[in-house]
Image (tube, rainbow, N blue to C red):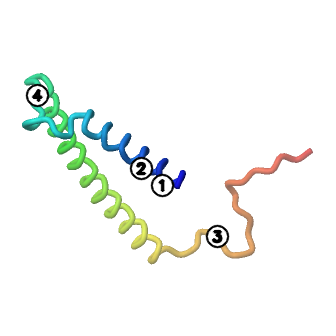
Amino acid sequence: MFLELALFIVLLAFLARWVASGVGAAGPARLEPAHTAELARLREEMDQLTAQVAQLQEEQTFTIRLLTEGRAGEAPALPAGEADPTTHTEKP
């Protein structure tokens, strides 16, 4: 019985808050002209960024393709037993 009463009170509180928050307000909310202009500017910048990201993806795909094709035709620079001349070890 106590649990049912507590649940009912919580439900009523939730409904009261929902109604008080303006859910039942008439008409859609209006934006100020400054906000509308700012949203338009942000949309334009987002479109530019989307185009730049698409271009970067194409460039990355092209670079990866070049690297992959280049590796297929290359022979190893050093025979398997020789050390890499680019690594230097200091002698004590």
Q: Residues within 10 Å of mark 1 (few under 14, many from 20)?
A: few
Q: Circles 2 and 1: CB distance less than 8 Å? A: yes
Residue at x-position 9% and y-position 37%:
28
Q: Secondary structure at mark 1?
A: helix
Question: Could you tell me residue 90's position as x and y percent?
Answer: 83, 46
Q: Is residue 61 left or right of residue 67?
A: left
Label 1 sits on what residue type?
Answer: Glu
Question: Could you tell me residue 71's position as x and y percent?
Answer: 47, 72
Residue matched to label 2: 8
Q: Is residue 73 above or below residue 89?
A: below
Q: Residues within 10 Å of mark 3 (few under 14, many from 20)?
A: few
Question: Could you tell me residue 61's position as x and y percent?
Answer: 33, 63
Q: Nearer the viewer, mark 2 or mark 4?
A: 2
- Separation (CA) of disc 3 from disc 4: 62 Å
Q: Nearer the viewer, mark 2 or mark 3?
A: 2
Residue matched to label 4: 37
Residue 4: mark: 1
Label 4 sits on what residue type?
Answer: Ala
Q: Circles 2 and 4: CB distance less than 8 Å? A: no
Q: Circles 2 and 3: CB distance less than 8 Å? A: no
For marks 2 and 4, the one nearer the N-term is: 2
Residue that lies at the very extreme toward the right in this rendered image: 92
- Separation (CA) of disc 2 from disc 3: 80 Å
For marks 3 and 1, the one nearer the N-term is: 1
Q: Residues within 10 Å of mark 2 (few under 14, many from 20)?
A: few
**Closest to the observer, 68 or 77:** 68
**Closest to the observer, 42 or 61:** 42
Q: Is residue 82 left or right of residue 5?
A: right
